Image: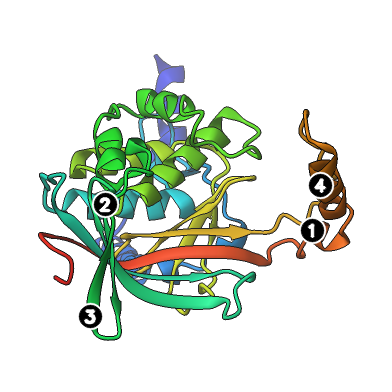
Amino acid sequence: MEEIEIVKQMFAEPRPEPSVIAAGRERVARGTRRRTRRAAPFWAAGVALGAAAATVAVVTVGSGGSGDPAARPSIRLSAAQEVLSQAARSAEREPALTPRPGQWVYYRFAGYDPKRKDPVYRGEGWQRLDGRQDASRIGGRIVVSGPTTSEPPLSTPLGAWRRLAGLPTEPRKMLAALRDQPDLAPDGAASADERAFAGAAELLWDSPLGAPPKVQSALYRALATLPGVRVDRAPDAVGEPAVGLSLPHTEEILFDPRTYRYLGGRTLSDGVQMKRPQPPAGLSAAKRRAWDAWAGDPANYRVPPAGALVSSRLRPVVKLVDRPGSR
């Protein structure tokens, strides 16, 4: 028992004076006030957007033991995940639509195409939701063209809207459905994730009205789970501010950086030289000569430097209307 008392005395600490306790409390309060600040806006956070990947960074705060609340890990979203999360919340706030085949969609469009005489173009137009008629303003008059049935039903505004509306909202099932869209994925998509991303980009463009809010929100949340999504905040060539998301070998999906509303798509060069294609089988002699002349022209194989803009297409304004001419 005597040894136990000796040990207790060795590790016993005298109670600090009240003045020492008060000074310590004041130091803690000052330190807390210095560290407390308002959360900075996402775009002011200093994130390197040009090459940001959609990976999850797990940051451990504090250094206590496993029972210390300060030691619990917190999750910080990547740039791409932040954009898609904001886009999902924005989509949820959109009104639900019940489009009908005889209605029209009005849109203002803009784009960049280096093959045109004026590469940057703008305009406005109308399209019937079933794709059978188009309209434009010519000389102050609304000129309607059609009817026509040349548009495949799935790529018409209403067909694409219904196709999106039928997608599952659970992320893994959503991505599986997007991967299984062989008519949408481009030839350059090398992986299942690239096919899913490219399919989403094409469906969003084919459907000016988007999708039902819950489905469009789920689509963005599903894309946020894909690893390696990159962010590019460079202004678009047409002058519209835009945030672009992409995977390798896919078109960028463009969002408005203020509202996070879907804007359109943009293609950047990967700098890879195209291979000379093989001629299709069964060509006649005349068509084979024409093919060889085209294939032998070096201009058809010029590749812009990596990162250079190849093309873009945007719809800054989209509205559901009852007739052409309405805005």
Q: Residue furthest top?
A: 1
Judge from the rendering whether residue 192 lies leftward or rightward of residue 156; answer left or right.
right
Question: Where is mark 4, residue-wise?
Answer: 291
Question: Can you tell which mark lies on residue 147?
Answer: 2
Question: Where is mark 3, residue-wise?
Answer: 141
Place of residue 25 in the rendered image (x, y in percent of width and height, measured from the top left): 28, 63
Judge from the rendering whether residue 103 lies leftward or rightward of residue 183; answer left or right.
left
Residue sitting at 51 percent across and 74 percent down?
235
**Residue situated in front as seen by the camera: 61 or 187:** 187
Quadrant of the drawing holding the C terminus: bottom left
Q: Secondary structure at mark 3?
A: strand
Which badge, 1 or 3, comes first in the chain's sequence? 3
Question: Where is mark 1, residue-wise?
Answer: 300
Which badge, 2 or 1, comes first in the chain's sequence? 2
Circle 4 crowding by C-alpha within 10 Å: few under 14, some 14–19, many from 20: some
Query: Which kind of residue does numbered mark 3 sit on?
Result: Arg
Which badge, 3 or 2, comes first in the chain's sequence? 3
**Residue situated in front as seen by the camera: 13 or 122:** 122
Query: Which kind of residue does numbered mark 2 sit on?
Result: Pro
Which badge, 4 or 2, comes first in the chain's sequence? 2
Indicate the colouring scheme. Answer: rainbow
Place of residue 105 in the rendered image (x, y in percent of width and height, measured from the top left): 22, 59
Query: Which kind of residue does numbered mark 1 sit on?
Result: Asn
Judge from the rendering whether residue 209 lies leftward or rightward of residue 80; answer left or right.
left
